[in-house]
Image (tube, rainbow, N blue to C red):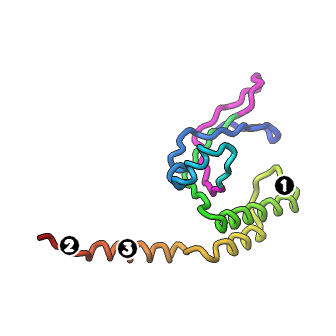
Amino acid sequence: MPKLDKDAPVEVKLDSAAAMLEAALTEEQRRGLFEHPGMCVIVIAELHSVSYTGHADSEDKAAQVRLRMRLVEAARDDEQTGLVLEVMRAMMRRRKMTDTLDEVGPGETVVEEAVTEALAGHPTEAEFEAHQETTRRRRGSRVEQFG
């Protein structure tokens, strides 16, 4: 991995593998994005770096990193959109208060509190797993009659 100067700019590019994004969007959202240029869909995404272009001192070219969305979920209604935007605003407030608007660093409790509040009405991982187990049991016990 190349080492960069602390102040060296790094250009970010998104990888072309967008299957996760397509799967996260509803048919209505995909259609709306196509039919209404400028439409906005709010998503939560996990980005992973997949490749980089090094930087040589003799080049006048910025270092570049290519990112891929591995996990992505799109807000499906106004309530979810509002919750995600509130979390984003909390994160922005933290960066403004700590004068790190141009940096990425460890989060503070302001964000954790906003996330906890925003997720209060959503199922937990344990609730989701219980739902999946119930669904599996129902499918396995179904008897079909032919005749």
For this orientation, the residue located farthest to the front is 35
Lower position in the chain sequence, tag 2 or tag 1: 1
Q: Is residue 141 left or right of residue 116?
A: left
Three-letter amino acid code at the position of disc 3: Thr
- Give how far across and how far down residue 26 sits, in percent: 53, 55
Residue under pointer 3? 135
For the point 62% across and 64% down, which residue is it?
77
Residue 11 lies in magenta, yes or no? no
Q: Nearer the viewer, mark 3 or mark 1?
A: 3
Mark 2 Cα shell of 10 Å, populated few (<14), some (14-19), many (≥20): few
In the image, residue 33 above or below residue 44: above
What residue is rendered at 74% in x and 31% in y? 62
Q: Mark 3 vs mark 1: which is more N-terminal?
A: 1
Query: Residue placed at 65% from the left, 32% from the top?
Result: 53
* Image location of residue 46, percent across then percent down: 60, 54
Disc 2 vs disc 1: which is toward the camera? 2
Residue for badge 2: 144
Task: Count neighbours of disc 1 (C-alpha within 10 A) and say few if under 14, some if 14 to 19, many if 20 or more.
Answer: few
Callout 2: SS = loop
Asked which secondary structure carries label 3, the reply is helix
Q: Residues within 10 Å of mark 3 (few under 14, many from 20)?
A: few
Give the mark nearer the N terminus: 3 vs 2: 3
What range of the chain is rendered magenta? 42-63
State the residue position of label 1.
Answer: 100
Residue 80: % across, % down: 64, 66
Q: Amino acid at mark 1?
A: Thr
Q: Are marks 3 and 2 in contact (CB under 8 Å)?
A: no
Which residue sits at x=62%, y=76%? Answer: 121
How far is the residue under mark 3 from the one under mark 2?
17 Å
Comparing 72 with 98, the one in front is 72
